[in-house]
């Protein structure tokens, strides 16, 4: 009878020969791979990292001297995670990039399965148009461009406008479900009044007879002013030890995330506040909108000020330390993970 032998019994050459043999049949031994496939805890390739805004901005403005938005389609510098070089990823599942639209420039209409968010870094004179509705974007606004919606952008002012683009195309590509197309004209026709969705959905009101026709939020623009006012009022109470004062952006129809794949939040850290250690399985991109401070992410520490961007990998312990009162915007793939039933978080035990 044939009995299996252990690899240290001198059988490893036979096993390797077997693996080589089955490879020709497009087969492989699970027992050699299992530990790497199903890990006891997340083993992110995403690294904790931070980007100071000034050098990022300088490089983006330099790109503005080298090519037009027409030539580029979108003049975007990819913000690339050092653990994922060459992959156009800020985290394993998400894209992050800084887009520059110079005065008078327009970015032509297209649509793709990938959903996008914009977070406005500077300049108040650009609009985006999504499926026929325009909204002027102001610094700190969080703007959604849901999957498969026609979108174009324009800068109608005298100043350059810069925003952060967050996209979910790596999730779409995981499923090999990507489509994209250009609109035959530079602009998709305007079908609604400017800021129409804000008038209907932006004020804790819903249109009578409203029906849910999409898994995406009907609200295009979540204004910074509104979020900031809410944080200021909230900050009269005691802070949460883990998050300070934190608000999640929601789809007003469902209370769920604004897009099925991407979640976003904004939080205020009072002067001198230190958050308790927190982990979650959604690698998160943070942008400081006000104040300054530092964040410990495992062994990595990043000192941030206004407009700086930093990333916390999945399951890395995160602690924020505010100098003056500070505000952080953040986005992640938490929405996708929650829909799949796999999202986890862990608060410091004393604060759970
Ligand atoms: C895109 O369509 C935009 O519409 C921005 O502004 C960034 C990055 C990758 C792929 C498509 C935009 C993008 C993008």
Image (cartoon, rainbow, N blue to C red):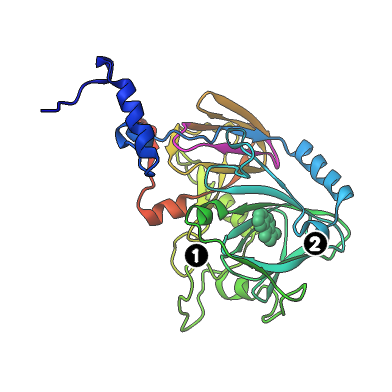
Q: Nearer the viewer, residue 200 or 264?
A: 264
Residue 30, which numbered label?
A: none
In the picture as drawn, the residue positioned furthest to the top comes out as 9
Q: Is residue 312 magenta?
A: yes
- Rendered residue at 45%/75% (across/down): 212
Horizontal and vertical percent position of residue 14: 30, 24
Horizontal and vertical percent position of residue 204: 51, 69
Separation of marks 1 and 2 at Cα, in angstroms: 26 Å
- Mark 1 or 2 closer to N-term? 2
Asked whether residue 261 appears in the rendered view, the answer is yes
Q: Is residue 62 magenta?
A: no
Please tell me how many numbered marks the rendered image carries: 2
Above or below, 301 against 96 in this view is above
- Rendered residue at 20%/22% (across/down): 5
Horizontal and vertical percent position of residue 100: 78, 53
Write down the residue under mark 1: 251
Locate the N terminus by quadrant.
top left
Write down the residue under mark 2: 125
Above or below, 314 against 181 in this view is above
Decide if residue 199 is on the left or right side of residue 239.
right
What range is drawn magenta here? 305-317
Asked whether residue 39 appears in the rendered view, the answer is no
Decide if residue 185 is on the left or right side of residue 159.
left
Above or below, 350 against 337 in this view is above
């Amino acid at each position: 009878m044939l009995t299996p032998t252990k690899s240290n019994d001198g059988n490893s050459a036979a096993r390797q020969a077997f693996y080589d043999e089955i490879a020709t049949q497009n087969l492989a031994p699970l027992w050699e791979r299992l530990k790497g496939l199903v890990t006891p805890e997340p083993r992110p390739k995403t690294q904790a990292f931070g980007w100071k805004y000034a050098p990022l901005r300088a490089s983006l403005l330099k790109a503005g001297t080298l090519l037009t938005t027409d030539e580029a389609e979108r003049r975007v510098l990819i913000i690339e995670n050092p653990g994922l070089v060459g992959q156009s990823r800020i985290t394993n599942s998400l894209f992050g990039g800084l887009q520059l639209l110079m005065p008078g420039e327009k970015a032509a209409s297209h649509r793709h399965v990938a959903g996008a968010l914009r977070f406005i870094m500077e300049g108040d004179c650009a609009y985006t148009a999504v499926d026929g509705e325009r909204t002027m974007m102001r610094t700190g606004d969080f703007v959604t461009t849901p999957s498969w919606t026609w979108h174009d952008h324009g800068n109608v002012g005298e100043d350059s406008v810069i925003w952060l683009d967050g996209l979910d195309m790596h999730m779409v590509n995981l499923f090999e479900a990507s489509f994209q197309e250009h609109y035959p004209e530079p602009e998709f026709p305007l079908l609604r009044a400017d800021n129409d969705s804000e008038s209907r959905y932006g004020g804790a009101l819903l249109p009578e007879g409203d029906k849910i026709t999409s898994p995406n939020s009907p609200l295009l623009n979540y204004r910074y002013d509104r979020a900031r006012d809410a944080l200021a009022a909230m900050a009269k109470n005691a802070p949460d030890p883990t998050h300070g004062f934190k608000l999640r952006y929601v789809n007003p129809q469902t209370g769920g995330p604004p897009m099925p794949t991407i979640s976003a939040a904004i939080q205020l850290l009072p002067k001198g506040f230190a958050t308790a250690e927190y982990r979650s399985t959604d690698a998160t991109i943070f942008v400081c909108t006000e104040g300054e401070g530092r964040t410990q992410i495992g062994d990595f520490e990043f000192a941030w000020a206004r407009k700086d961007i930093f990333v916390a990998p999945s399951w890395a312990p995160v602690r924020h330390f505010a100098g003056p009162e500070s505000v952080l915007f953040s986005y992640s793939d938490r929405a996708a993970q929650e829909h799949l039933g796999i999202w986890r978080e862990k608060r410091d035990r004393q604060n759970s």
